[in-house]
Image: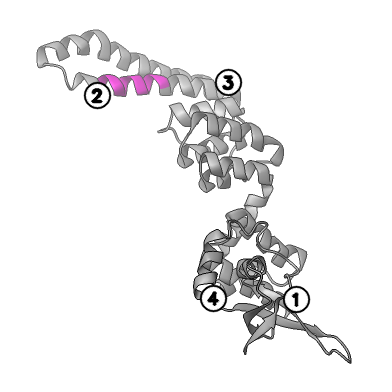
Amino acid sequence: MTERLPLAAIRPPRFKLRRDVGNLTDLKASMQARRLLQPILVRKVGQTGAPSNKEWFELVAGHRRWVAAAELGWTDIEANIIEATDAEAVELSLVENIQRGELDPYEEADAYRYYIKEKGYGSGKELAAKLGKSPAHISQRLLLLNIPEEEFTRVKSALSISHAEQLARLPEVEIRDMADALIETKMSSDQAKAAVDYRRAGLSVEQAVHRALEYADAPTPTLKGKQWDAHRVAREQIVLTLQQALHRVDFNMADLPDTEQAVWQQRIRAPLHGLTDVALKTEKEIGA
């Protein structure tokens, strides 16, 4: 049912999905020119007694339009009135805001937390089905809450949401140092994942970042075996350094004339290949 309701009869939702309605300039200009293209969504929550018998409504969706109407000096607004439980009201609000792309990932995560953990309206799997999302998406968003909001904002602004999602896999006390390193080195999200994997496996932040940047072809730890130790990491990095050097020599030798290649093969590549083999054997012997 659609009616024009007094703005004064509508109260904000009990749980606000958005911390900030953002810049309303364009929205207000559109509303002034074309009125309201889509009614807000409300539910009836009460009624005063005689003699006024005023009805009270709670906003379900359309928070920005409601605020813009108030700022424009409107006294009433077109609204679709529905019947909805507390849980259904949150679900509907989530659906509209997600479809409109009006929630940042941290706000989305906090809404999931409120629905699942604080209010116990349903499981992550149940909420995912109602929102048309995968359970993995819900879980991944909830992980973001492991990051202090100011750190999330800093990393998202400097790098990307994907980087923040990787940081969320670390204990909160370790996030700031790793965030500083990711931002300073401007590493890709794949490198950030590797760096976090190395940190979780026991390397220091400095070691983890160095390995992720310098040894991109190296296998990342599975985290199923023993924790990595500094000595083992150092031995492996010596081997990787020689292997990378050999690969780069091959790459650059390909551009040399045949006669010159023979010289480099004899004096540089062959000894380097032999040294790499010795390093591999040494690493296996000591690391056994």
Tell me which amino acid carries mark 4.
Arg
The reply to whether callout 1 and callout 2 are in contact (CB within 8 Å) is no
C-alpha separation, residue under disc 4 versus residue under disc 3: 69 Å
Instruction: Count every numbered label the image shows and give the total.
Output: 4
Name the residue that disc number 4 marks. Answer: 35
C-alpha separation, residue under disc 2 versus residue under disc 3: 31 Å
Q: Of helix, strand and loop, which mostly describes the magenta segment?
A: helix
**Which mark is nearer the camera, 4 or 2?**
4
Residue 136 spot, x, y in % from top left:
56, 60
C-alpha separation, residue under disc 4 versus residue under disc 1: 19 Å
Residue 140 spot, x, y in % from top left:
58, 55
C-alpha separation, residue under disc 3 versus residue under disc 1: 69 Å
C-alpha separation, residue under disc 4 versus residue under disc 2: 65 Å
Name the residue that disc number 2 marks. Answer: 251
Name the residue that disc number 3 marks. Answer: 231
**Which mark is nearer the camera, 4 or 3?**
4
**Which mark is nearer the camera, 1 or 2?**
1
Tell me which amino acid carries mark 1.
Ala
Q: Is residue 68 magenta?
A: no
Relative to 255, 190 lies left or right = right
Residue nearest the observer in this picture, 120 or 99: 99
Q: Is residue 68 above or below residue 158?
A: below
Tell me which amino acid carries mark 3.
His
Q: Outermost residue, bottom direction?
A: 50
Q: Is residue 249 magenta?
A: yes
Quadrant of residue 55 within the rendered picture: bottom right
Tell me which amino acid carries mark 2.
Phe
Numbered disc 4: secondary structure? loop
C-alpha separation, residue under disc 1 versus residue under disc 2: 73 Å
For the magenta stretch, what is the residue range? 241-250
